[in-house]
Image: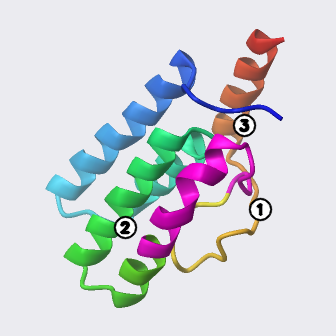
Amino acid sequence: MKFNLKIPKPLKLAYLAELKSYRYSLKHKDFNKAWYHLERSHIIGQLYPIEHTYSHLLMLRFGLMQKNTKEVFGQIIRLLVGGWKSFINHVPLGNTGGADIPPLMRMPIDDDIQKLFDKNEKKEC
């Protein structure tokens, strides 16, 4: 069994870029785009407990800002289980992390993110 403790640098940089875009969009009140970048940060970081948990924490805060009860409760549940599932490498890849998506549903991964994953996987071999 593989334990995911630390996100590799190329993924960390992409993860942080998505969070920067999230904050920019939020500051400019482009809430749809802000959410889009949160979902992308979730996909990139979901295999790593700290990044995965932090994405869900930001999603919870976003749900609170939007007064979206479904999102708030969905994120609380995900915060309780998401981190340890990524630690043991048991996450549904591509899942965007929002409460509107079943937590165990695998989803297609955007091409640019998939290429990033593929490059990182080759480096680990």
**Which secondary structure, mark 2?**
helix
**Which secondary structure, mark 1?**
loop
Give amino acid for label 2. Answer: Asn
Asked if residue 103 lies in the magenta stretch, the reply is: no
Disc 1 and disc 3: Cα gap in Å? 14 Å
Quarter of image, res 36? bottom left
Q: Is residue 27 above or below residue 35?
A: above
Q: Is residue 31 above or below residue 82?
A: below
Question: At 32% from the left edge and 85% from the top edge, which residue is drawn?
Answer: 68
Residue that badge 3 annotates: 114
Question: At 71% from the left edge and 30% from the top edge, which residue is drawn?
Answer: 117
Q: In the image, is 93 to the left or to the right of 21?
A: right
**Which secondary structure, mark 3?**
helix
Question: At 26% from the left edge and 53% from the top edge, which residue is drawn?
Answer: 25
Q: Which mark is residue 32?
A: 2
- In percent of width and height, residue 53 lies at 45, 51
